């Protein structure tokens, strides 16, 4: 029993080193070796989020609550970055990294994991930095329920990661996945809960919109931030269960792809 545990620990340690090496390789490939390039990892999502916030403010967009538009846009669009960008990075990720598959310890799931972690890091640093800045200048109040907010963020990240790995694996089988994902991501954005509060919808629609998994994640983040300032509706067990199923499907498909691309 002890020897098996030690073997598992050594295996996990080896794979974590592989993922770390792939992560650093991805950073250097994407952003270069200069510090300003690394800063782009989280400056890019910060600029996107800030841009959307400004546009929504200028348009005086209605969102069904008394929340300031800055607070509403930050908590909504930041979560979108988690689930939208991860699949885009995993789709087509294997071909440029095929040479790495000659290394015995490198697996397809390691390549996907490195890219998913990088996107999660960028979105999280962006969200935290903008939150602290807006709190400092008085545009936001400190979060009222940090644990609920973190839970919503992590569940959304889990959903994005499992979806990314599944689509990344399926994209190796057919080009249709890549062609469909980009328009699908844009269509899902207004349905994801980023641009509305569930409570502002008609009662008949609230039940059905919660079947869209991202909505629960956004509502949890907003409850964590705003507490009793807003009435939120979410189904955390459903979101977690959805992520479990998506993860299992992703692991099955990634395993199939791994056998197909690993050199003999």
Image (cartoon, helix red, strand yellow):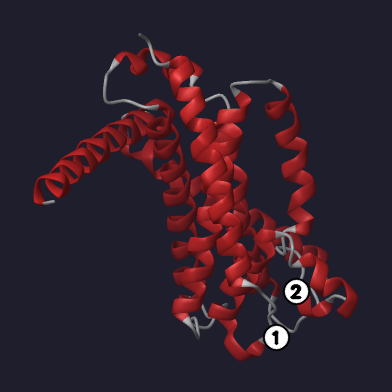
Q: Is residue 208 visible?
A: yes
**Residue 181: quarter of image:** top right
Most foreground residue, 260 or 179: 260
Q: Which mark is residue 105?
A: none
Residue at image point 48% right, 16% down: 260
Q: Is residue 203 above or below residue 249?
A: below
Residue at image point 87% right, 71% down: 205
Question: Label 1 to label 2, Cα distance in Å?
Answer: 8 Å
**Residue 19: quarter of image:** top left
> What number of labels is visible?
2
Report the residue that reaches farthest toward the front: 1
**Residue 228: quarter of image:** bottom right
Residue at image point 64% right, 73% down: 235
Is 253 displayed left or right of 8 in the figure? right
Q: Who comes first in sequence, dot 1 or dot 2?
A: 2
Report the residue that reaches farthest toward the left: 3
Callout 1 secondary element: loop
Label 2 environment density (alpha carbons within 10 Å; few <14, some 14–19, many ≥20): many
Is 105 displayed left or right of 261 in the figure? left
Is 256 displayed left or right of 17 in the figure? right
Q: What residue sits right under mark 2 in the picture?
A: 197
Q: Is residue 159 visible?
A: no
Callout 2 secondary element: loop
- Give coordinates of residue 59: x percent, y percent: 82, 64
Image quarter in which the C terminus is found = top left
- Give coordinates of residue 188: x percent, y percent: 76, 50
- Give coordinates of residue 163: x percent, y percent: 59, 44
- Give coordinates of residue 232: x percent, y percent: 68, 80
Residue at image point 52% right, 62% down: 155
Label 1 environment density (alpha carbons within 10 Å; few <14, some 14–19, many ≥20): some
Q: Does the residue at mark 1 contact the one at mark 2 (Cβ under 8 Å)?
A: yes
Q: Which mark is residue 231?
A: 1
């Amino acid at each position: 029993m002890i020897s098996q545990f030690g073997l598992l620990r050594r295996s996990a340690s080896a794979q974590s080193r592989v993922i770390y090496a792939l992560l650093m390789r991805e950073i250097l490939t994407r952003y270069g070796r200069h510090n300003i390039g690394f800063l782009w990892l989280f400056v890019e999502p910060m600029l996107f989020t800030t841009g959307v916030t400004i546009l929504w403010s200028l348009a005086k967009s209605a969102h069904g609550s008394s929340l300031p538009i800055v607070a509403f846009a930050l908590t909504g669009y930041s979560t979108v970055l988690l689930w939208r960008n991860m699949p885009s990075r995993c789709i087509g990720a294997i071909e440029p990294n095929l040479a790495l598959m000659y290394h015995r310890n490198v697996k397809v799931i390691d390549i996907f994991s490195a890219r998913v972690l990088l996107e999660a890091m960028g979105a999280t640093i962006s969200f935290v930095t903008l939150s602290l800045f807006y709190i400092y200048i008085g545009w936001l109040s400190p979060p009222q329920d940090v644990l609920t907010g973190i839970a919503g963020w992590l569940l959304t990240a889990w959903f994005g990661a499992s979806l990314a790995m599944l689509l990344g694996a399926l994209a190796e089988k057919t080009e249709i996945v890549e062609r469909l994902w980009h328009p699908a991501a844009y269509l899902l954005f207004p349905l994801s809960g980023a641009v509305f509060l569930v409570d502002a919808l008609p009662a008949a629609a609230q039940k059905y919109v919660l079947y869209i998994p991202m909505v629960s994640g956004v509502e949890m983040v907003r409850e964590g931030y705003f507490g009793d300032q807003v009435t939120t509706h979410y189904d955390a067990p459903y979101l977690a269960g959805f992520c479990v199923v998506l993860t299992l499907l992703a692991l099955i498909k990634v395993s199939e792809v791994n056998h197909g691309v690993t050199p003999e």
